[in-house]
Amino acid sequence: MAADNQESRSAWCETAPEPQPFPELASDARTGVLIVGAGYTGLSAAHHLAARGVDCMVIEAHQPGWGASGRNGGMLVPRPKKPLTAIEAHWGRDEALRQRRLLHEAIETVCELVADHGIDCDFAQDGYLAAAHTPKALDALAAEVRWLHQAAGETEVQLLSRAEISEELGGGAYCGGYLDPLGARVQPLAYARGLASSLAARGVPIHGSTPATRVRAIEGGIAIDTPRATVTADQLVIATNGYTPPGLFPDGLAQRVVAVSSSAIATAPLPRNLAGRILPRGRTMSDTKHLLNWVRLSPDNRIVFGGRGDITGRRADAASYKGIEDALHALYPDLADVPVTHRWSGLVAVTRDHWHHLGSLSPRIHFAMGYGGRGVAMSTLMGRYLARLAVGEACDLGPVTAAFPPVPFHALRIPGMKLTAAWYQAKDRLGL
């Protein structure tokens, strides 16, 4: 996405701390590990490197939290893109159990960072709801619950009936669903800004308005050019995800993901007659549609609702949000008279195999990306593992660290995205 004002349209700006200005890097510098990108992945990597006493620096083309880390739903979803039952069928039970453990570790890592840095970001572990939009989808969720009970011993995950999911949400016509108490939430922009400010206060150099413009191998390290300075480093960590510039990094890294626009809206704070009826327990929810919707409450009692608007991110007019507003009002007809006050979007990175990936392009260059819209917790965890790669430790996370091929016909991604979205919309309408 080109420079835009979508960030300033976000409802999260209403309750996040005022942004601390991080200055542009104005003179050449030397560091042990240079991190490109000041979202959750890069800031978490900086935290974990600094905790080890490793010299590191962060550069960001805009300001910390400007991209998806400041625009997402703030939902720590304990459900991988691929169902655990499907992971077991393809990779075996041990791998499925490992991926479930990684979800636990990811949410625990966010909790640890929030506590360690004293970040005021509305972190709460109130649980996550998966809502089934068809009986077939409910059967699949029931299989997931059985697997969690029998294979993982997590009997606290509950299958919900139609009436129970409606009561949990305070509305809707879903067929049922499940409740996973592991799920949590944050105010996403407050989390990003708070972590960046705390790291800077602890002595980690963070420079905003400092895009990387060229990456060069030099004797004994890496040189990264920026508009006004060059950084030389022993190791490079790439944490740009859906905002990875084409052609900047080696091995066609940007061509391994497709950046898809995800949109959100927020209402005015709920009026008294609705407060307490919608999402009464403060849980977060996403449904089982191919082009899913999600919903949660904000710290200032707004309904925040997300889905797909213009999938390319090229349009930001009111018409591109109409489908999302219609879906919100279908879920909660009582909100028809409550104004929608905020509309915004950001980019999520989708991979060919629907896994997020962690790896190395060389012994000195490491990356993590491709969270597919579920990166709040997992990107924080991948920052921890990036720190390990940068200090020379091996990381085996199964499919996450497996081969990461480019997306075929990447140059045709925009018409391809439109065709895929139309196909998914048709399947959702038909209940397939």
Image (tube, helix red, strand yellow):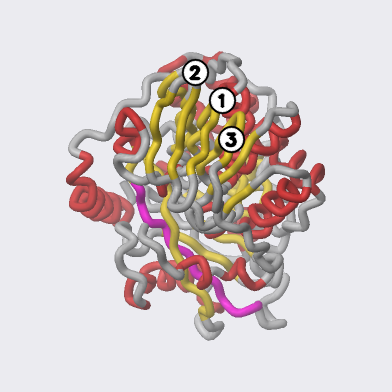
Q: Give the Cα separation between the discs numbered 1 and 2.
A: 8 Å
Q: Give the Cα separation between the discs numbered 3 and 1.
A: 37 Å
Q: Which residue is mark 2?
A: 398
Q: How many neighbours does mark 3 have within 10 angstroms: few (below 14), some (14-19), or many (20 or more)?
A: some
Q: Position of residue 66 (x, y in %)?
A: 53, 58
Q: Which of 323 and 43 lies nearest the eye of the viewer?
A: 43
Q: Residue at x 77, y 53 (%)?
A: 119
The answer to whether 339 appears left or right of 109 in the picture is: left
Q: Position of residue 169 (x, y in %)?
A: 61, 61
Contact flag, marks 1 and 2 (Cβ < 8 Å): yes
- Between label 3 and label 2, give the one nearer the viewer: 3
**Was residue 179 drawn as part of the magenta stretch in this picture?**
no
Res 276 visible: yes
Task: State the image quarter where residue 310 is shown.
Answer: bottom left
- The secondary structure type at the circle numbered 1 is helix
Q: Which residue is mark 3?
A: 30
Q: Which residue is mark 1?
A: 99
- The secondary structure type at the circle numbered 2 is helix
Q: Which of 91 and 200 lies nearest the eye of the viewer?
A: 200
Q: Earlier in the sequence, mark 1 or mark 2?
A: 1
Indicate the quadrant containing the N terminus: top left, top right, bottom left or bottom right. Answer: bottom left
Q: Relative to 172, say whether 137 is above or below.
A: above
Q: Which residues are magenta?
A: 259-269
Three-letter code for the amino acid on which mark 2 is drawn: Gly
Q: Which of 387 and 179 lies nearest the eye of the viewer?
A: 387
Q: How many neighbours does mark 1 have within 10 angstroms: few (below 14), some (14-19), or many (20 or more)?
A: many
